[in-house]
């Protein structure tokens, strides 16, 4: 077997040591005499997995003890609707920061259940930047401000939360667990697992005590909520109102254990920022390359770029794949190239990409 360096934007690469653990658990988990995907979600062995996953997430991310941790399904795309459905009254003003495709989709869902408004956008410049914290000016009546911390398609990332006293809701799908965050500054954080937390199919949702209490008020105003979309139902049933993604939660727990083994988020952040800086330095070294994001908005997770000569982009992607550098093609909506540098990507992969870029430029520049 020959594993390539996987720069996929998601599902992303997983730590090889975790893959080995998952492989063994598929056949027989612990002393169960059955695989992790075969045991009951009501069994004690899986209950232990679930509680360990929650405990590790609380430790790794610094989640306050009074915050609920949910493991749901439907991805961030379902949260785009579920968040305002649970936490905004029909007449509430809800403010959204539009920094790309997924932020725009979150806003579109919020419009169906609240008085949603985009209060900042970089759409006019093809989403090449994010706002500085002080640039965000919420409406006086805004119940919350929603933002996307990292934008996979355009390669931009918020260095800090918006500077506002409004309640903050954040989609952290593509950079969660890559750097320390102030969870207590947010009332809602959600993230699809398939970037830095594990395989696709699990969505982590963190809710403050205010958020859980708020659901009751919203339910009264709306005449109730569908049980499967009600945060309080999910919390009361410890994420097991329906059968959860047992394998995905186990994988998430193992990935968080791996993060702890790396030294936690400070160590992970230092490694990630260093290799992102090396790649951006290579892109900035000549006009052969054209990075998309403005320098002060660049993402350490998704590096997006084009070639000065766009006719060469197809050859670059094809030759890179042949060289063991896979999934460098940009999102179908924008084209170009994208190198996703999620936590589990080996540092050698970035060095190999930089070396390949140098050789490609030498032959085609």
Image: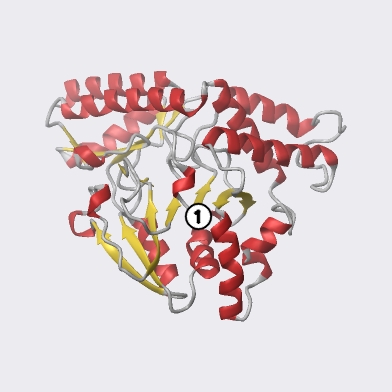
**Along the viewing direction, whichever of 230 and 322 lies nearer the viewer:** 230
* Depicted 295 relative to depicted 135: above or below: above
Q: Who's the residue at 25% across and 42% down the image?
A: 297
Q: In the structure shown, which secondary structural element does the residue marked by tag 1 occupy?
A: helix
Quadrant of the image containing the N terminus: top right
Quadrant, the C terminus: top left
- Residue that label 1 marks: 76
Say which of 282 and 137 sits in front: 137
Relative side of 153 to 121, left or right: right
Residue 159 position in % (x across, y down): 31, 40
Q: Is residue 342 above or below residue 16?
A: below
Asked whether the viewer can see residue 172, the reply is: no
Q: How is the image coloured?
A: secondary structure
At horizontal 62% and vertical 37% (from top left) the residue drawn is: 252
The residue positioned 79% from the left and 47% from the top of the image is: 41
Q: Residues within 10 Å of mark 1 (few under 14, many from 20)?
A: many
Q: Is residue 311 above or below residue 347?
A: below
Position in image of residue 294 (x %, y %): 20, 42
Q: Where residue 285 sits: x, y (%)? A: 15, 25
Horizontal arrangement in the rendering, residue 264 relative to residue 168 (left or right): right
């Amino acid at each position: 077997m020959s594993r390539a360096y996987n720069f996929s934007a998601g599902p992303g690469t997983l730590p090889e040591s975790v893959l080995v653990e998952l492989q063994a658990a598929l056949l027989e988990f612990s002393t169960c005499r059955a695989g992790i995907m075969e045991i009951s979600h009501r069994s004690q062995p899986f209950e232990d997995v679930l509680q360990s996953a929650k405990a590790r997430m609380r430790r790794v991310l610094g989640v306050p003890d009074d915050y609920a941790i949910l493991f749901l399904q439907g991805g961030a795309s379902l949260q785009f609707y579920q968040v305002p459905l649970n936490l905004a009254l029909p007449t509430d003003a809800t403010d959204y920061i539009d920094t790309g495709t997924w932020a725009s989709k979150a806003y579109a869902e919020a419009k169906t259940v609240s008085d949603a408004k985009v209060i900042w956008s970089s759409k006019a410049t093809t989403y090449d930047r994010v706002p500085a914290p002080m640039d965000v000016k919420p409406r006086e009546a805004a119940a919350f401000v929603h933002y996307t911390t990292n934008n996979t398609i355009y390669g931009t990332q918020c260095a800090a939360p918006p500077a506002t006293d409004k309640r903050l809701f954040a989609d952290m799908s593509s950079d969660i667990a890559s750097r320390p965050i102030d969870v207590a500054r947010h009332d809602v954080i959600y993230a699809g697992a398939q970037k830095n937390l594990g395989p696709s199919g699990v969505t982590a949702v963190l809710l403050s005590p205010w958020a859980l209490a708020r659901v009751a008020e919203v339910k009264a105003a709306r005449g109730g909520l569908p049980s499967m979309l009600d945060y309080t139902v999910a919390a009361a049933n410890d994420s097991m109102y329906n059968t959860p993604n047992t394998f995905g939660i186990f994988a998430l727990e193992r990935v968080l254990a791996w993060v702890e083994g790396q030294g936690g988020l400070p160590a992970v952040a230092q490694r990630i920022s260093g290799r992102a800086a090396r790649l951006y330095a290579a892109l900035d070294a000549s006009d052969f390359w054209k990075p998309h994001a403005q320098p002060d908005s660049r993402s350490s997770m998704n590096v997006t770029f084009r070639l000065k000569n766009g006719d060469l982009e197809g050859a670059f992607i094809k030759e890179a794949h042949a060289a063991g550098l896979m999934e460098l093609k940009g999102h179908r909506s924008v084209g170009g190239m994208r190198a996703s540098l999620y936590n589990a990507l080996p540092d050698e992969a970035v060095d190999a990409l930089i070396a390949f870029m140098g050789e490609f430029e030498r032959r085609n520049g």
